[in-house]
Amino acid sequence: MSEDEKAGAAEPRAAQAAAASESDVAASNARGAIWYVVAMLLLASFFAFGPILCGDGDEARIRREGVAAKARVTKIVPTGVYFNDQPRVRISLEVTPEGQEPFEAKVVQFMSPVDLPRYQPGAVLDVRFDPQGRRDVVFVEP
């Protein structure tokens, strides 16, 4: 085989290698874009559902350190949001701490439909509230 024939045979191989390299780069870019989209979706899901799934740290702190009081339900309104067939409701309360002036507060939470009758207007419930942020109230289960 002459030098010209060897050079001619090498050119198609080099072109094939260059084309393969370009397709590898394109595939790698596509995989990178897919992973980027997956990562962004996971991040968005964490911010959207994290508080629902992980709970609220303030609620546990208020249960431990909050001031006990009685609260009368003045209004209960569904927000239109459901999670596992449980409605999210906004409950308006008139909280009456012992020896202090009553104040208004709202609690927004997901609630089992079985528990809804206990929270109807006029019902008096045990609660705990944050003395620094009197609007932060949690229900104390009997």
Image (tube, rainbow, N blue to C red):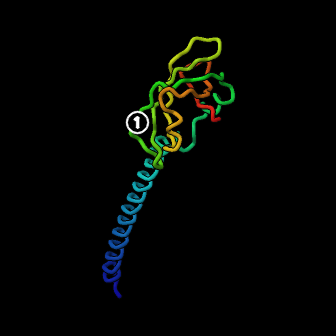
Q: Position of residue 119 (x, y in %)?
A: 51, 33
Secondary structure at badge 1 equals strand
Q: Quadrant of residue 8?
A: bottom left
- Comparing 1 with 23, the one in front is 23
**In this picture, is 8 found above or below 54?**
below
Residue behind mark 1: 79
Residue 50, visible in the rendered structure: no
Q: Position of residue 10 (x, y in %)?
A: 35, 77
Estimate how packed mark 1 is, as few (under 14), some (14 to 19) or many (20 or more) residues with alpha carbons within 10 Å: few
Rendered-image quadrant of the C terminus:
top right
Q: Which residue sits at x=41%, y=51%?
A: 37
Rendered-image quadrant of the N terminus:
bottom left
Q: Amino acid at mark 1?
A: Thr
Q: In the orientation shown, which residue stands out farthest toward the bottom?
A: 1
Q: Which residue sits at x=53%, y=40%?
A: 115
Residue 130, visible in the rendered structure: yes
- Comparing 16 with 68, the one in front is 68
Q: Which residue sits at x=53%, y=21%?
A: 135
Q: Which residue sits at x=61%, y=27%?
A: 127
Q: Is residue 118 left or right of residue 97?
A: left
**In this picture, is 80 found above or below 98?**
below
Q: Is residue 33 left or right of residue 71?
A: left
- Comparing 119 with 87, the one in front is 119
Q: Position of residue 40 (x, y in %)?
A: 44, 47
Q: Position of residue 72 (x, y in %)?
A: 53, 24
